[in-house]
Every structure is written in C-alpha cells, then in structure tokens.
Amino acid sequence: MSLSTEQVRRIATLARIELSAAEAEATRGKLNGIFGLIEQMQAVDTTGVEPMSHPQDVAQRLRPDVATEPDRRDAFQRIAPQTEAGLYLVPKVIE
Amino acid sequence: MINASLTELRAALDAGKISSVELATLFLDRIERLDPSLNAFITVDRDGALEAARAADARLAAGDAGPLTGIPLAHKDVFCTEGVLTTCGSKMLANFVSPYDAHVVSLLKAAGAVSLGKTNMDEFAMGSSNENSHFGPAKNPWDTTRIPGGSSGGSAAAVAARLVPIATGTDTGGSVRQPAALTGVTGIKPTYGVVSRYGMIAYASSLDQGGAFGASAADCAQLLTAMAGFDPRDSTSLERPAEDYSRELAAPAAGRPLAGLRIGLPKEFFGAGMADDVRAAVEAALDEYRALGATTVDVSLPNAQLAIPAYYVIAPAEASSNLSRFDGVRYGHRAAEYRDLAEMYSKSRAEGFGAEVKRRILVGTYVLSHGYYDAYYLQAQKLRRLIAQDFQAALAGCDIIAGPTSPTTAWAIGEKSDDPVQMYLSDIYTIAVNLAGLPGLSHPCGFGAGELPVGLQLVGDYFSEARLLNAAHRFQQASDWHLRRPAIAA
C-alpha cells in the first residue's frame, strides 16, 4: 500500500490539521514507512479470533442517575481562549 | 540524603533528623543546579513544594504521618495538577494551568507527598526518546549527549540524577520501563486498570497506564501502593481491594530467596535484534537469579513480532479520537488568525501539535476511516487477542517472564529522530505487555559499552505486581547495580 499526496491531504482534512503542499509531501514519505510496518498484520489469518478491546473484559459499571459534579464553570472557562457570559466563543458558523 | 532510600528518608523524617522543608529544599536546590544540563523538568514548583512540605511537617509534628508524608516526588507532565502548568510536552498545552488534579495527584497529595514539579516527556507521551518534547529533549544523566528514553524520559532522568527520590510516569507501549532501563533506575507499569487514568491526559486509552519510578523495587513498591486503587471516575478502573505492594519485601534475606520461582525466557526476546552488550548483561543477571534459587525455562511468544504493527494501529486510532478534543475552543492553543471555524480548528491544531503527534493522528484517522476499519483496527484487536493468549500459554509453564527491556542502551540524541519506524522498533520488547494488559517491571542489571545502563524486564500474570517487585527486590539485595550513580549524582 502506498498513499498518494492527495490521500494524505484528504486525511489531514478529516483530522482538521492544516498541511502545506511541502508538508504533505514530506509527511507522505513518513506515513508510507509506517504503513509498511503495519502491513505485516495482513499476512496473519485471524478468522474466528474475537477482537480484544480491553484486557480484563469487564462490563461497564452503572451508577445511580444523580449529579456528582459541582458547578465549576468559572474555573474551566478561565483557561479558555475566548468566552463571554458563560459561553465559549467561536467564529460565526451560520450566516 | 540524596541517595537515601524511601525507608531511610522515612526514618530520618520520623526521627526529626531532617524536616520535610529541609528535604524539599535539598532536592529543589539540586534541580536548580543540575537541571539546566538535563532538562528533566518542564516546571519546577518551588513555592507549591515548600507549602506542601510545611503542611507535611505539621502532620509529622501531630503524629499524623503516613509512609509518604514529607517525601519529595515529581509528576510526569501528563498528570493534571490543579493550579500548576500541565503541558503534556506540547505547544498545544503550553499555557494550560489545570483546574483540577488527576486521581493519582490527589492520592499522593492526600498521602502528604511533596511534589517538586512536572517532568519532561515526549509530546502527548508519543515517543521513545523524549526528543518529541516541545520543551527540548531531556538528557540522559549517564551521558548528556544521549537520550534518556521515552516517553517518561524526564521522570527517569530526574530519579537517575537524584533530582528527586521517586517520580510518576505513564506507560502505553513501554514509556516507564524503557526509560527506566536506559537511565539505570527501576520502573513498574502495573496491570491495566490498577492506576486510575482520571486526569492523566489520554493518548491510547485501552493501553495507557500510570506507573512508578524509583532507585529500587522497594521504593517503586511504596509509590505504587500510594498511586493504585479503584476510582469510579475512570470507566476502566478495576474494582479490587487495595494492595500493599511492599508486603512480600519485609521477609528477611535468605540464601536462596527465590527458590521455586520459575522464570520463563521467551525465545523471541533473545533473538538477533538484541545488542551484544545488552545480551551479556541480561545473561549475567539471569545467572544471578539462578544463584538466588530461581530456575529458568524456555517459553515462546509466537506472535510477538506482530505487537509493533498492531500497536501502531491501535494506539494512533485511539489517539486520533482522544486528541480531537484539542480544537482551540475550551483550552490550549488557538491560532491567531483564521477566516472561519474550520480554519480555526485546522490552524490551531497545525500550530499546536508537533510532527510525530500529527503523524499518529493521521495514521489513526486513516485506519478508522470508512472502508478501512476491518482491515486495520479490527485486525489489530484480533492480533491483540492472539498476543494476550501467547502470554497466558507461556505463563502456564512459568511464574514470571524475563528478558531485555530495550534491544540497545541509550542512543545519541538525533540518531533516530528522523526515522519514525526505527524509533518504533526500539520498543519491541515492551509493547506486547501493554497489548496484553499485563504488569511489567524494569530494573538495572548491568552496563553496556560506554558505561551505559542495561535493564532487565520482568513480566507477570495479571495482578502479580507484588511478585515482580519481590523478585527484583531479592535481586537488588544481592547486587548493587541499582546503587550505581552517574557522576552527576555523586
């Protein structure tokens, strides 16, 4: 498998990371090296093997449906780039 | 005092031979003097440390001291610390003063331990050399032209240079054990789920696990005991009774304290990839284990070579999801100029993340994208099952598994930094342990060429931390590799 520069740019768009043309080309070489390593996986027949997502195979815990978190909005918004009246500000999305 | 064990520090504090403030000052002054040449710390919190030390002294005076009250330590900068800069080694979080404490941080605060600061690390814990830090690489105290390992390189270097007696770390693919090996200290990663991930900035959530660094297995056991325990705020935290990981260490030293212990040697960990000087030190250490009464048996982990490919699908996939939270909206870096929301995201992330973090996000985004999920993420999770089953089969014939922690000693800064694949291969012996979720430990076992430390890795079955620590402790009672110090710590 070998990624094209166009594919790299598409992945970067999906990942919301701006890449210049020069960066995309340099990144392509490195990513293809990494995928060369990863492709070794494909030679293994894993028919019938159950995927493993957690070492202990534990079930998700349930808890009573009660609020446990205190209101710390001011502390959390103090570190935000831009807030106003308790809201996070971002560029206008809807014209 | 600089080279004292935790037991000795405890005795000195309890006897009033030194106060916690004096002890903290001693180590803070060392950091001030020596860290400019090591870069092991991103943040030194002198004021916070002295305040915590005064509180510890008050507890000592009131007869309310626990095992770690008044003991200085440092946290890897992946752990959120309320009111203290928490960067995760990234420009993205270079301005992030956490509004809350990680569970591990609150436990150690409650125990009265005194945090001196936050240690250097590969950005978002992605790396094996500490060269991916936005704040410059930490240096190996044994040779400052070399890497200390990663990603918890700053914690390992700080303990090795005795800038602090103990330190926390995290281990996703070897990030406690490998830097411990390369800097000549002891480090343990417990069973996945033993240490809470709450407030530990996430990289690959199904693999990330907190761990402990110290000069000895005995020091690591004390720190791990204080860090571990069930936490309802981490959905993968295991509900188990608290353990005293030091419980087996008090038994008096006997001639053959490890009699009956069967050590499995996986043939895949003793193949061609291991450097000759590492092999010589590891073989000598195994002879010492036999002299202590252990027997060795050959075992096999037939799918071991698939661990790195599987890891470099699972970890980037989970990272691409975890790191989507860094969008320049709620915290962290926001680009100065942008035309619209999409550009604000993509510029903030392009500016805030370093090259390796971007690569892993891109790999993860690709393997999770439509049409590729089964071929990559699902296949990797199936291989993960095979690897975990290999360990169970091997552990049916032995009590613990031993081998090298790292195929080489510490390499020169810059030597592998332009070749991600070469860097990834340096974790060949540690990654499979994370995929299986097993506990692993590395302890110093000798020196290779150029007087660089070599580590021996011990791996056990789930929840066998106390057994691993006891085996390493008995080795350390009979040898002095863990007492060797780099010239900088003399």
Image: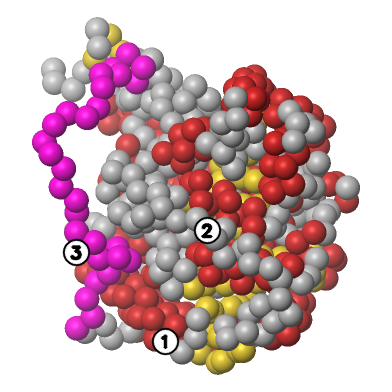
Residue found 52% across the figure and 65% down from its top: B466
- Discs 1/2, front: 2
SS at mark 3 in the image: loop
- Discs 2/3, front: 2
Q: Which residues are magenta?
A: A48-76
Marks 3 and 1: CB-CB under 8 Å? Answer: no
Which residue carries the number 3 mark?
B371
Which residue carries the number 2 mark?
B245
Residue B253 shows up from this direction: yes
The answer to which of marks 3 and 1 sits earlier in the sequence is 3
Percent position (x, y) of residue A63?
16, 43
SS at mark 1 in the image: loop
B329 to the left or right of B356: left
How packed is label 2: few (under 14 Cα within 10 Å), some, or many (20 or more)? Answer: many
Q: Is residue A88 above or below residue B135?
A: above
Question: In this rendering, do the residues under marks 2 and 3 share a single chain?
Answer: yes
Q: Chain of mark 3?
A: B
Question: In this rendering, do the residues under marks 1 and 2 share a single chain?
Answer: yes
Q: Residue furthest bottom?
A: B298
Q: Chain of mark 2?
A: B
B427 to the left or right of B392: right
Question: Mark 1 belongs to which amino acid?
Answer: Ala
Q: Identify the image quadrant of the C terminus of chain A.
A: top left
Label number found at residue B396:
1
Task: Check residue A63 for magenta coloring.
Answer: yes
How packed is label 1: few (under 14 Cα within 10 Å), some, or many (20 or more)? Answer: few
Q: Is residue B148 above or below residue B108?
A: below
